[in-house]
Image (cartoon, rainbow, N blue to C red):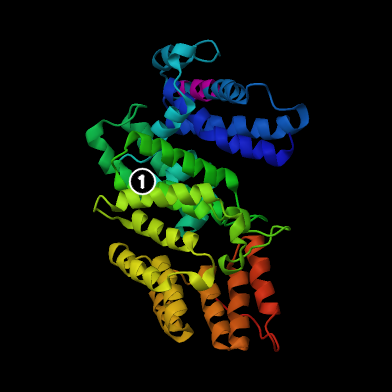
C-alpha cells in the first residue's frame, strides 16, 4: 500500500481507535495523545514494513501501551498509584470481543461526547473536527477563520473539560439528544466541506473526509429517522458529493460547475438525495440544511447551467438568509442574483458582504467579485481580484485555477491588491 493510502486508512481509523481507548480507559485527553503517537508510529512504519492484517487492532494495541505509560507517569505525579493502577495497569491486550461494540457505534458515541452541551458551541465543533474528523489543528482553525494558536487553546480547554466532567462514554439519553444535535450536524457539515474543498495541500478533494461525513450522517439518520434536518443534511451531502467526479480535470485542476461534464455526476446519489429532501420538506418544518439541499437539487437536476432555475434558487437563498445570517450564504445569494439580474446587481450585494468584514481574507469573496467583474467586461479589475483571491487561497489547486483565470484575461496584469 503506498503512502497516501496509508494516510487515508489512518484518517478513517482515528475515531475508531480513539473511541476504543476512551471506552476502555476514560481519560479523553490522554487517550487522544496516545492515539496520535500510535498514528505517528504507523505512518512511519507501515509504508516501510507493510500494513498489518488488522490495522485497527494494531493501532489500539500500540495506543494502549502508550496510554498505559502516560497514565503511569500521571499516577506517579499525583500519588494515586492505588486508584489508577486498578483501572489501567492491566496486562496490555485488546478487550475481549464481548466488551467491544461496532466501530460505527464508537465513532457516533465519540461524536456526541465531543458535542456535549457543557462545552461552548465553538469548542464542540472544533474538538469533534479534531477527534472524529481527523483534521489537523491548522485545518480546524481555517474552518473557523481564527489563528491556529487560538484554536489550539480552544481544543485543549475542551479536552480538559471533558476529562474533568467525568462524562460516561455512552450515547446520550433520548431527552439529551436535541441539545447536542445542532453542533453534531454542524460538525458533519464542516468535515464534508473540508473534504470537498480542501483548505490546504495540493489536491482539491479529500474523498475520505467526504465519505466519512456521509457515513456518519447515515448513522445519525438511522438513530434519528424523524429528524428533518438530519435527513436534510444527508441529502445535501449526497447531492453535493454527486458532482465530485467532474469537479477536477485529468491533472487535478479545478473545474467550475458551469464547465463540468454533467454526465460524470453520480446519478444514483442525485436520485437518493432528491428523494430525501422531498421527504424532509413534506413534513412542513424546513431548516437550513433542507433549504440548502433543495438548492443543490435544483443545480443537480438542471441539464446545464443555462437551464438552471436561478429565480427559484434566489428565492431559496432568501429563505436561507432569514434562517442563517451567514456571510457565505449572502455571497452565494449574490451569485444567484447575478445569474438572474446581471453582474451589477450581484456586485452590489458582494459589496455588502465585503462591508460585513468576516470574509475579508477569505478567497471566495475576491473570487466571486473577480467573476462578476469579468462578466461585466472589466478585465483589469477582474485580474486584480483573481490575483487577490489566489494570494489568499491556501490550496494549490485553487491557486492555480484563480491565477489561470487572471492570465487568460486581456490586457496588462496590475499588481494584486494588498489585503
Looking at the rendering, the stretch of residues picked out in magenta corresponds to 68-75
> Does residue 69 belong to the magenta stretch?
yes
Looking at the rendering, in which quadrant would you find the C terminus? bottom right
Secondary structure, magenta segment, majority class: helix
Is 74 part of what is drawn in magenta? Answer: yes
Name the image quarter holding residue 324.
bottom left
Residue 58 against residue 10 in the figure, above or below: above
Q: Nearer the viewer, residue 326 or 240?
A: 240
As drawn, 206 above or below 373: above
Residue 257 occupies which quadrant of the picture? bottom right
Image: 107 above or below 64: below
Residue at horizontal 47 percent and vertical 60 percent from the top:
301
Q: As drawn, is 333 to the left or to the right of 192?
A: left
Q: Residue 178: x, y in percent?
A: 26, 42
Instruction: Give me the residue at 42% from left, 17% from top.
Output: 84
Percent coordinates x, y for residue 73 in the rendering: 51, 23
Callout 1 secondary element:
helix
Q: 10 Å neighbourhood of mark 1: few (<14), some, or many (≥20)?
A: many
Residue drawn at x 42%, y 49% is 235
Amino acid at each position: 500500500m503506498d503512502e497516501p493510502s496509508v494516510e487515508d486508512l489512518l484518517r478513517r481509523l482515528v475515531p475508531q481507535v480513539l473511541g476504543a481507548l476512551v471506552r476502555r480507559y476514560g481519560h479523553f485527553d490522554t487517550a487522544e495523545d496516545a492515539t496520535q503517537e500510535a498514528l505517528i508510529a504507523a505512518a512511519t512504519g507501515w509504508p516501510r514494513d507493510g500494513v498489518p492484517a488488522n490495522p485497527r487492532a494494531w493501532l489500539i494495541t500500540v495506543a494502549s501501551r502508550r496510554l498505559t505509560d502516560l497514565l503511569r507517569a500521571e499516577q506517579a505525579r499525583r500519588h494515586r498509584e492505588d486508584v489508577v493502577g486498578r483501572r489501567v495497569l492491566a496486562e496490555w491486550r485488546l478487550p475481549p470481543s464481548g466488551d467491544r461494540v461496532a466501530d460505527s457505534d464508537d465513532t457516533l458515541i465519540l461524536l456526541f461526547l465531543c458535542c456535549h452541551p457543557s462545552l461552548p458551541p465553538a469548542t464542540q465543533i472544533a474538538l469533534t473536527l479534531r477527534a472524529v474528523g481527523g483534521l489537523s489543528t491548522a485545518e480546524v482553525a481555517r474552518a473557523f477563520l481564527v489563528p491556529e494558536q487560538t484554536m489550539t487553546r480552544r481544543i485543549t480547554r475542551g479536552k480538559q473539560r471533558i476529562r474533568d466532567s467525568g462524562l460516561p462514554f455512552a450515547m446520550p439519553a433520548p431527552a439529551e439528544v436535541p441539545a447536542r444535535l445542532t453542533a453534531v450536524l454542524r460538525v458533519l457539515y464542516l468535515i464534508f466541506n473540508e473534504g470537498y474543498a480542501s483548505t490546504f495541500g495540493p489536491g482539491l478533494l479529500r474523498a475520505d473526509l467526504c465519505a466519512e461525513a456521509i457515513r456518519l450522517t447515515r448513522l445519525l439518520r438511522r438513530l434519528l429517522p424523524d429528524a428533518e434536518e438530519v435527513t436534510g443534511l444527508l441529502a445535501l451531502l449526497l447531492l453535493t458529493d454527486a458532482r465530485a467526479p467532474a469537479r477536477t480535470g485529468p491533472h487535478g485542476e479545478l473545474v467550475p460547475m458551469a464547465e463540468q461534464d454533467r454526465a460524470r455526476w453520480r446519478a444514483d446519489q442525485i436520485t437518493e438525495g432528491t428523494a430525501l429532501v422531498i421527504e424532509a420538506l413534506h413534513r412542513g418544518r424546513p431548516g437550513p440544511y433542507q433549504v440548502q439541499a433543495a438548492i443543490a437539487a435544483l443545480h443537480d437536476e438542471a441539464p446545464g447551467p443555462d437551464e438552471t432555475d436561478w429565480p427559484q434558487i434566489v428565492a431559496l437563498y432568501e429563505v436561507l438568509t432569514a434562517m442563517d445570517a451567514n456571510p457565505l450564504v449572502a455571497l452565494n445569494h449574490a451569485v444567484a442574483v447575478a445569474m438572474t439580474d446581471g453582474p451589477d446587481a450581484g456586485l452590489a450585494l458582494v459589496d455588502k458582504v465585503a462591508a460585513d468584514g468576516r470574509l475579508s481574507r477569505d478567497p471566495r469573496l475576491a473570487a466571486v467579485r473577480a467573476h462578476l467583474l469579468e462578466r461585466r467586461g472589466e478585465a483589469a479589475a477582474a485580474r486584480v481580484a483573481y490575483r487577490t483571491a489566489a494570494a489568499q487561497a491556501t490550496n494549490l489547486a485553487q491557486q492555480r485555477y484563480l491565477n489561470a483565470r487572471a492570465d487568460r484575461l486581456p490586457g496588462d496584469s496590475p499588481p494584486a491588491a494588498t489585503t
